[in-house]
């Protein structure tokens, strides 16, 4: 990917991750309040309903955090351009999480920062994922599972201009440290313990092997 100026949303995410590299990944909306009280600057909402979009968007913005919503897991909402337009208008998130490359341009046109998820099963899926991210000109890429430093390194080397998020199966401070050391810009996790750790603790855990 050629170097280019980041969109406003991607720049805001980069700044938030410099403040705290852990992203609160929220699958159960009952944990949203916990995420909003945490040290994290960014929330990935992986489950909600159509009727809750406006309220959730207001709550996250009111807490001064950045919101990314996974389109595929909004109950009652479609998976097309009209759905993206509705989500952008009602919830007003910073970004949209999707595995659907055809919706990335729609999200970008509406001022959302698209986050492209890449599921790595083998070397072929790694190569395919990198090519898909290049084709869509993705500014933010989430690598799952995020506990494979070599995969993070490979994607970082091939997509030097993108923000790389390591997600999935990250449970310890050392795993966060390893992902960051491998080139990840941030780490998404459902672990509230990691949400509330001081950023410096991840480098310390890596050095101590804990």
Image (spheres, helix red, strand yellow):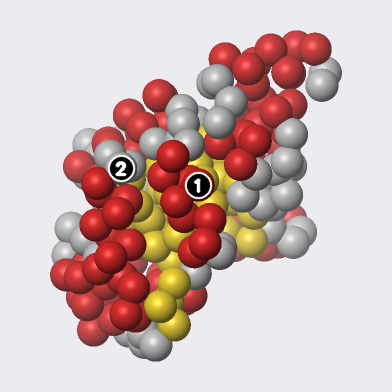
Question: Going from the N terminus, do you reach mark 2 or mark 1 first?
Answer: 1
Q: How many marks?
A: 2
Give residue 106's position: percent from left, percent from top. 24, 71
Image quadrant holding the N terminus, namely top left
Taking the spot 25% from the left edge, 48% from the top edge, the residue there is: 61
Taking the spot 40% from the left edge, 78% from the top edge, the residue there is: 49
Which residue of the protein is positioned furthest toward the right in this rendering? 209
Q: Is residue 148 left or right of residue 110?
A: right
Give residue 74's position: percent from left, percent from top. 42, 77
Give residue 135's position: percent from left, percent from top. 40, 60
Q: Identify the element where label 1 is drawn.
A: helix
Q: Is residue 194 left or right of residue 174?
A: left
Depth check, front residue: 14 or 2: 14
Q: Is residue 63 visible?
A: yes
Q: Is residue 100 visible?
A: no
Give residue 146's position: percent from left, percent from top. 67, 45
| Structural crowding at the residue carrying mark 2, measured as other residues with C-alpha within 10 Å and reported as few (<14), some (14–19) or many (≥20) | some
Taking the spot 73% from the left edge, 18% from the top edge, the residue there is: 205
Taking the spot 65% from the left edge, 44% from the top edge, the residue there is: 191
Q: What residue sits right under mark 2 in the picture?
A: 63
| Structural crowding at the residue carrying mark 1, measured as other residues with C-alpha within 10 Å and reported as few (<14), some (14–19) or many (≥20) | few
Q: CA distance from mark 2 to mark 1?
A: 11 Å
Depth check, front residue: 31 or 86: 31
Picture quarter containing residue 182?
A: top right
Picture quarter containing residue 196?
A: top right
Q: What residue sits right under mark 1 in the picture?
A: 34
Depth check, front residue: 160 or 73: 73
Report if the CB atoms under discs 2 and 1 are less than 8 Å apart: no
């Amino acid at each position: 990917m050629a170097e280019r100026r980041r969109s406003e949303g991607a720049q805001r995410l980069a700044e938030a991750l410099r403040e705290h590299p852990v992203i609160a990944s929220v699958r159960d909306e009952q944990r949203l309040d916990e995420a909003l009280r945490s040290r994290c600057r960014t929330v990935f909402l992986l489950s909600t309903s159509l009727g809750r979009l406006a309220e959730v968007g207001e709550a996250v913005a009111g807490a001064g955090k950045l919101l990314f919503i996974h389109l595929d897991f909004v109950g009652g909402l479609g998976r097309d351009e009209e759905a993206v337009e509705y989500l952008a208008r009602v919830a007003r998130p910073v970004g949209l999480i999707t595995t659907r490359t055809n919706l990335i341009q729609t999200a970008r046109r509406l001022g959302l920062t698209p986050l492209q998820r890449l599921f790595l099963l083998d070397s072929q899926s790694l190569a395919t994922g990198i090519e898909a991210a290049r084709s869509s000109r993705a500014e933010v890429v989430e690598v799952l599972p995020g506990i494979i430093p070599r995969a993070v390194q490979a994607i970082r080397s091939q997509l030097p201009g993108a923000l790389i998020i390591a997600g999935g199966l990250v449970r310890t401070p050392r795993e966060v440290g390893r992902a960051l050391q491998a080139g990840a810009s941030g780490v998404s996790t459902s672990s509230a313990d990691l949400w509330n750790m001081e950023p410096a603790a991840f480098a310390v855990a890596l050095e101590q092997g804990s």
